[in-house]
Image (spheres, rainbow, N blue to C red):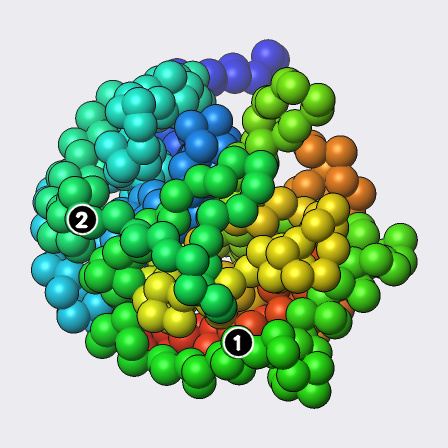
Amino acid sequence: MINSISFSKPIFDMNRFLLLIVGVILVFTSCKKADYQKVTHDPELYRVTVKKLNDIVLENNFPPVIASRNYVYANIAAYEVIAAGDPQHFRSLAGQIKHLPAVPKPDKDKEIDFQFASLLSFCFVGNAVTFPEGSMFLYIDELKKKAKDAGMPSDVFNNSVAYSDIVAKHIMKWSKKDNYAQTRSASKYTVTRKDGRWIPTPPMYAQALEPHWGEIRPMVLDSASQIPAPEPPPYNMTDKNSVFYKSVMEVKQLGDSLTTDQKHMADFWDDNAFKMNVVGHAMFATKKFGPAGHWMNIAGIGSKMKNADFGTTVAAYTQASIALFDAFINCWYVKYKANSVRPETVITKLIDHDWRPRIQTPPFPEYISGHAVISAAAAETLTHSFGDNMAYTDASESEFGIPARTFTSFRAAAQEAGLSRVYGGIHYKNACITGSMSGRKIGQLVVEKLKLKIK
């Protein structure tokens, strides 16, 4: 007898099938989301973007003080997008910077890639404050293509672009009230031949650079004069025991006997955005990024070494750029208040007609040292962002044929940056020491007043 065997028909479970389909879609969607976020949320992309602006600043010969303005507004625009997208970890600068009005909030019902939007805001503002206006258009197109190629959904893309535009316009409107436009038509510096007063120096004999920069609205300082500097030693070349005479001779004697390392130090921190070279009857200019651009590069080095995430990277750049901006305003106020003569002018007139400094003397008064002030200010913020005693190697000058230098900390680099100007032959040591003291105070004030990250 053969046993009958029954075969049950498979039951089609529509609910299970639908759940499976939904699961597959969710997995696929999350993978695509992860794919495009790997691109747009990569802090290296922000570092590359800042460097892109740095290159445009270099190509268009922006003086150091104006360059600091380019960086600060672009970084603040980027940061405000990050703060809007992640208010649990980042605090808006509106109100912390007293004159910065609240930034429009994003629509909660719209999905926005805030990292991508921050990149675009940086570029839109950087594009507007540089000339020729539109210098970053091609790079903006590159960023958009990266996002699309990585699979960013069209609604997220459009929402992100729209919000970046809102924030960029808000920051640009605010920037127009900083007195920059008014200083474009302000009176020029009056050159006189009074002993001890700054006059143009060779080979360009250029007129004084931005004598009204101290009138620009600062970010954190209450005014350009908030951090005062003591009066420089009085001009005195008749008394060989005077502080001024000894300072002049120190610069000359150092310049006449520089070691290989001192020469490297002077060249490394030269940061001359527009050096005029004279060979016989021929004259030609060479370009490098200025001191603010150099410290933007250093901020990038710190971010990369600490493996900082996107938001932390943006915050570090922003805080450093604010310190640089305010430091230049304070420094330029002091410079044109003191109107101190450069070593080259004194040495070639009274000691050695043929003497020349290691690096080219810039076209503005000597006291206090701009490099010393801005470097110390930036170093304080980067120390706050990434820690003290963080040894690093700075190879950012290699594109100009200058070998890298290694430092034990940001503060050590800032100290060397100030001292390098004495070896370069363009500053007396007192201007560098005093400048570093002012810069540290400015940097500390920025760290104290601006709380970007919420712990």
Q: Secondary structure at mark 1?
A: loop
Name the mark on residue 186: 2
Q: What label sits on residue 235 in the rendered view?
A: 1
- The image position of residue 296, as x and y in percent, is 51, 50
Which part of the image, by quadrant, shows the N terminus?
Answer: top right
Q: In the rendered view of the protein, which quadrant contains the C terminus?
A: bottom left
Quadrant for residue 243, please give it: bottom right
- Please report the residue visible at 48 percent of the width from the left and 73 percent of the height from the top: 439
Residue at (89% x, 53% y) in the render: 260
Within 10 angstroms of label 1, few (less than 14), some, or many (20 or more) residues? some
> Callout 2 environment at 10 Å: few (<14), some (14 to 19), or many (20+)?
few
Q: Is residue 378 visible?
A: no
Which amino acid lies under the numbered mark 2 shown in the image of this protein? Ala
Ranked by sequence position, the earlier of labels 1 and 2 is 2
Position in image of residue 113 (x %, y %) = 30, 39
Tell us which disc is closer to us: 1 or 2.
1
Q: Nearer the viewer, residue 338 or 71?
A: 338
- Reply above or below: 429 against 265: below
Please say whether residue 126 is visible from this viewpoint.
Answer: yes
Q: Is residue 75 above or below residue 222?
A: above
**Image point 56% across, 73% down: which residue?**
431
Residue drawn at x 20%, y 49% as measured from the top left: 187
